[in-house]
Amino acid sequence: MTYPLFMELTVLYRPVGRREYELIEATGFRAFPPRLPEQPIFYPVTNEAYATQIARDWNTKDGGTGYVLRFRVRSEFLRKYPVQTVGSSMHQECWIPAADLEEFNSQIEGAIEPIASFRNSSI
């Protein structure tokens, strides 16, 4: 498939825990791992503040570590997945069916970048 020299990219974020981080790291920060059978969607989020909230407040429970990852996806591909608001206007996600994750991964431009990490310091 040939792409134009200039292609529009959308920046997305993914909050992850330690195990998912290690699986992404094993790909050279190039792809997200397949979903588990009980996970029908992959849901990257549209803004860093929401990703930070999840990584800091949820992924660190029980002594865990939460990470915020940033990556770019070809916008043309992403348009077929409407943004879902799941709380306040800040809580926006793209819902990618698990069956589409391999194709989604092929639409990532460049590396998946770790930009923040959080650890539960109360344990």
Image (spheres, helix red, strand yellow):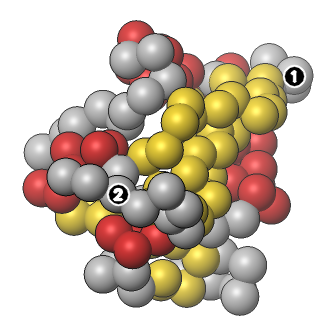
User: The residue under label 1 is which amino acid type?
Assistant: Ser
Would residue 104 be visible to someone looking at this image?
no
Is 54 placed left or right of 41 in the picture? right
Q: Give the mark nearest the N terminus, 1 or 2.
A: 2
The quadrant holding residue 91 is bottom right
The quadrant holding residue 20 is top left
User: The residue under label 2 is which amino acid type?
Assistant: Tyr
In this rendering, is residue 91 above or below 69?
below
Residue 32: which disc?
A: none
Q: Residues within 10 Å of mark 2 (few under 14, many from 20)?
A: few
In the picture of the structure, the residue carrying the numbered disc 2 is: 3
In this rendering, is residue 87 above or below 116?
below
- For the view shown, which residue lies furthest in the right direction? 121
Seen from the viewer's position, the closer of residues 12 and 6 is: 6
Q: Distance between the Cα atoms at labels 1 and 2?
A: 46 Å
Give x and y (percent) for residue 6.
Answer: 54, 62
Give x and y (percent) for residue 30.
Answer: 43, 28
Seen from the viewer's position, the closer of residues 100 and 39 is: 100
In the picture of the structure, the residue carrying the numbered disc 1 is: 121
User: Which residue is rendered at x = 73% and y = 79% of the image?
Assistant: 90
